[in-house]
Structure formats: structure tokens, C-alpha cells
Amino acid sequence: MYSQITVKSNIKDYSVSFVSLEDIDKLTDEDFYLVIIDKNVANNFPKLSYGGAIIIDTSEELKTWEGLQIIFDKFVEKKVNTLTKLVVIGGGVLQDAAGFCASVFCRGIEYILIPTTLLSQIDSCVGGKTSINYKSRKNIIGTFYPPNEILICEDFLYTLSHEDFSSGLGELFKFDLLRNKITNSHIEKILDEKKLISPDVYDSLKFKVSILEIDEFDKKERKYLNFGHTFGHALEITSKYKLSHGYAVVIGCLIALYVSKKMYSNFDKNIYQVALKTAKKILSNTVQIEKDWFAYDSLMECVKSDKKNTGCLNMVLIKNNNPVIQKIEDYSIIREALVKVYEALRLCN
């Protein structure tokens, strides 16, 4: 078992612990806790939803004003108040929506977060961000509201479909690139044997926490974690969410790498080739990539409406093996990157 990670926060410190399923069973048996759990997780682990748990049929639609009403109505029905201890068991979508509700209901109620997808375990569970979408703008409304603690249990990962599991590797792919470790990545081995994943979950969380403790509120260093997300988020929208977040991040990282390769003369071109090979492995036998998703005008419209947009196109790129924030002035490079990355990936399936 791995040592506990303590996250220092300006809002409140919290911990990340690696636990067994038995530990979570004991927690959800406590009378003063209210469990809100993803329907698929509840089906796979029925014991976790005993005792009047709120079971949510999770989709991206949950992260809307209309979707939140489902949670708020249940909070009212269950008489949730400031003494309630909420336990959120699910992936990133439920984490975002339930965390947002917890941050505003009764002006804030405590919650414990139990991420059940690889994507949420390896990245989004730490950082204290909650968010919902508004119209075409992804994660535009949200708060910084950390949980009291985060519990990581690898048992949940064994129930994931191949698509959900491999999609979750999108954030590990990003971290490997940011840490200049893509040439020594474990991703291909992980895809062959899921039990190899826990060390990478732990190392990725430690890496992210080291950045959060420098820049918790997205002023400078934390922005590096947006690597691959500029066009990743846009691709989610242009694909009408046929591309899951993890797969979109993988493609977004490749676009950012291609732009880096074109802009910096000393960029190690071998990095791009290795990353492309790894990306193809992640995307193999999953979603069928469509050309329309890469249409320049549609993608740029999404990028312009992104919450991180400041009036010009700034991208996180890789320069001298380190992340940098670069203002893009020559948009022909973007056009070329979209064409080249699509052509490189279109035959993955």
C-alpha cells in the first residue's frame, strides 16, 4: 500500500489515501454519511449503495443547470444540512457535479471523494475544482472546493470497459510528456496488464500535487496541466462527446506536440514519433475518428469560447523538454497540425 499524500491548500488541507474495498464498505455503513454514487458503480458494487444512497445515472448532461436539479432535489428529500457528510463515489462527471452542489448547498457541506475511473483517480480527483458546462462552454461555471479526503481503490478499475480504461490513460500520457518521460512510459504495458497501473496513479498524483502547492488557483504553473486541453476540450465538443475526455486529451497533446515541433528548432522530433506510437496504442480499437471533428473553423470557434481564452490563442507547448505557455500568432501552423494529426490517427481503428 502507498503512503498517504497530504495536499496543502489555501482553502483547507486534505489527504489522498490508497485503501481497500473493505475500508470503503465500512465507511459507507456509517449512519451519518450520505452516499451519492454512479449507477454503474452501484451495479458492480451493490453493497456501497445500501442505506438510502443517491444513485445517479451519470452522463455529461448531469453537468448542466437542469442536471444539477436531480442532485439538489435529492439533497432536499434527504434533508441534507451542514452536519451531513457526503460521500461521492464515481468518475469525473459525478465528481464535478456533486462537488459543485456540495460547495453551494447550505453554503458548503463536507464531502469525501472516492474516484472510480482511471481518469479521475490519476488526475482530476486532486485540485479542488468543481465545474459544470453552460451552453457550448465546457466547465465554465465552477468553484474551488476541495473534499475533506480522497480515497483511491484500484478494485474499481477492474470493472472498467477497455474503452473507459484506455481513455483514462489520456492524463497519464499528458503527465509523461510534461515530465519528459514518454520514452520510458509504462502505458503500453499497462494496456496489456491493468495491475501495473497503481504505481503510475501514485506518481502522477504526487506530480500534480507538487504543482498545486506552488500554484493552486491557476495563475501560472498549474496552467501547464492544461497541456493538450486547448484542442482536447474543443474536440470533445466538435465530436459531440463521441470522443471521451481522455481520448480528446491524447489527440490534443499530439496537436500541441506537432505545434511545438514546428515552432522550436531544437525540439526533439523523436519525442513526437514516440508519442504518436503510444497514442495509437491508446486509441487502437476504440472510437472511430472522424474528419469533421478536425475542421479548423469549428475547432477554433470552440477554442475561442473556452474559459481559458484571454482574447488570443495561448497554448501549453514543450520547449527544451519543459512546458511553456506560448502565444500563437501564425495560425497556419494550427491548420497544418490538425491535418497531420488527423491523417496520422485516422486508421487507428
Image: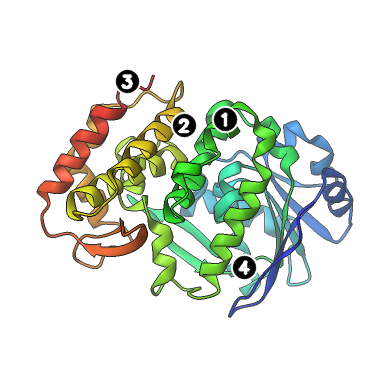
Residue positioned 29% across, 24% down in the render = 346
- Return the residue found at the far bottom: 10
Between the C-alphas of marks 1 and 3, the distance is 19 Å
SS category of the residue bearing label 2: helix
Locate residue 341, reporting x and y percent: 26, 35
Locate residue 306, reporting x and y percent: 31, 57
Q: Nearer the viewer, mark 2 or mark 4?
A: 2
What type is the residue that disc 1 sits on?
Answer: Leu
Of label 3 and label 4, which has the lower sequence position?
A: 4
What type is the residue that disc 2 sits on?
Answer: Ile
SS category of the residue bearing label 4: loop
Disc on res. 282 = 2
| Mark 2 nearby-residue class (10 Å; few <14, some 14–19, many ≥20) | many
What type is the residue that disc 4 sits on?
Answer: Pro
Camera sees residue 330: yes
Between the C-alphas of marks 2 and 4, the distance is 30 Å
Disc on res. 146 = 4
Q: Are marks 2 and 1 in contact (CB under 8 Å)?
A: yes
Camera sees residue 135: no
- Residue in the foreground of this view, choosing between 41 and 80: 41
Q: Nearer the viewer, mark 3 or mark 4?
A: 3
Q: Quadrant of the C terminus?
A: top left
Residue at numbered disc 3: 347
Residue at numbered disc 1: 191
- Tell me which colouring the rendered structure shows: rainbow
| Mark 1 nearby-residue class (10 Å; few <14, some 14–19, many ≥20) | some
* Snapshot quadrant of residue 183: top left
SS category of the residue bearing label 1: helix
Locate residue 286, reporting x and y percent: 46, 24
Residue positioned 62% across, 49% down in the render = 201
Locate residue 117, reporting x and y percent: 62, 42
Of label 1 and label 3, which has the lower sequence position?
A: 1
